[in-house]
């Protein structure tokens, strides 16, 4: 069940994957309930590079406890222990993740939200299925206007 519509924004941010840094210029996100399956919610961030010779995209599904959107979208720091990353059509779950989601500013109203924050990976995430792929410690910034 969605709590928000898809919110889009132009952005300039980067994500480090293995030994490469990817620059993204567009961001989409939404927040929804995963309650029918588990007592969790998911905040999905999809970063895109629309200016490159071919479109690059990385999606990060951040699993949270069951939190109402009016409580999720406010200045806050949340510990994250489960993330799902999708890159080049390949999806992988990372359980027991050591990460922090921080909202510097956030506001929820009428099925939409605004805000500025970041996802910080405290420990490197290593792919089980593709041993050469990993997501090192990093801070991934985002903003919705």
Image (cartoon, rainbow, N blue to C red):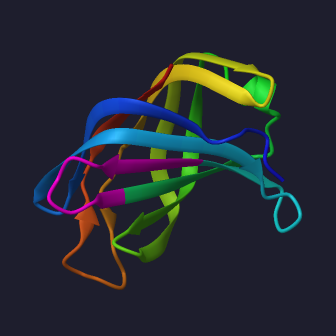
How far across and how far down the image is residue 66, in percent?
Answer: 80, 45
Left or right: 12, with 35 as reference point: left
Q: Which residue is pictured at 56% across the width and 46% down the height?
A: 80
Q: Quadrant of residue 30?
A: top right
Q: Is residue 51 magenta?
A: yes
Compare residues 58 and 92 and report the one nearer the observer.
58
How far across and how far down the image is residue 98, in percent?
Answer: 45, 50
How far across and how far down the image is residue 28, in percent?
Answer: 50, 43
The number of numbered discs placed on residues in the rendered structure image is 0
Compare residues 46 and 20 and report the one nearer the observer.
46
Q: Which residue is pictured at 51% across the width and 36% down the height?
A: 8
Left or right: 49, with 40 as reference point: left
Q: Which residues are magenta?
A: 44-57
Relative to 30, residue 95 above or below: below
Q: Quadrant of residue 24?
A: top left
Compare residues 136 and 31 and report the one nearer the observer.
31
Q: Is residue 37 magenta?
A: no
Relative to 130, residue 10 above or below: above
Left or right: 78, with 73 as reference point: left
Left or right: 43, with 56 as reference point: right
Query: Which residue occupies the extreme right position in the image?
Result: 36
Query: Which residue occupies the extreme left position in the image?
Result: 19
Q: Which residue is pictured at 45% across the width and 57% down the height?
A: 59
Q: Which residue is pictured at 89% across the width and 64% down the height?
A: 36
How far across and how far down the image is residue 21, in percent?
Answer: 14, 50
């Amino acid at each position: 069940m969605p709590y928000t519509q898809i919110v889009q924004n132009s952005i300039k941010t980067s994500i480090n994957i293995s030994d490469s840094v990817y620059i993204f210029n567009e961001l989409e996100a939404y927040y929804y309930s995963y309650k029918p399956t588990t007592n969790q919610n998911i905040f999905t961030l999809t970063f895109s590079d629309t200016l490159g010779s071919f479109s690059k995209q990385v999606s990060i599904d951040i699993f949270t406890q069951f939190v109402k959107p009016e409580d999720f979208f406010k200045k806050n720091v949340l510990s994250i222990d489960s993330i799902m990353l999708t890159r080049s059509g390949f999806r992988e779950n990372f359980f027991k993740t050591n990460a922090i989601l921080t909202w510097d500013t956030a506001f929820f109203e009428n099925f939409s939200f605004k805000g500025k924050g970041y996802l910080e990976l405290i420990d490197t995430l290593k792919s089980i299925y593709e041993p050469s792929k990993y997501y090192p410690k990093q801070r991934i910034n985002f903003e919705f206007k």
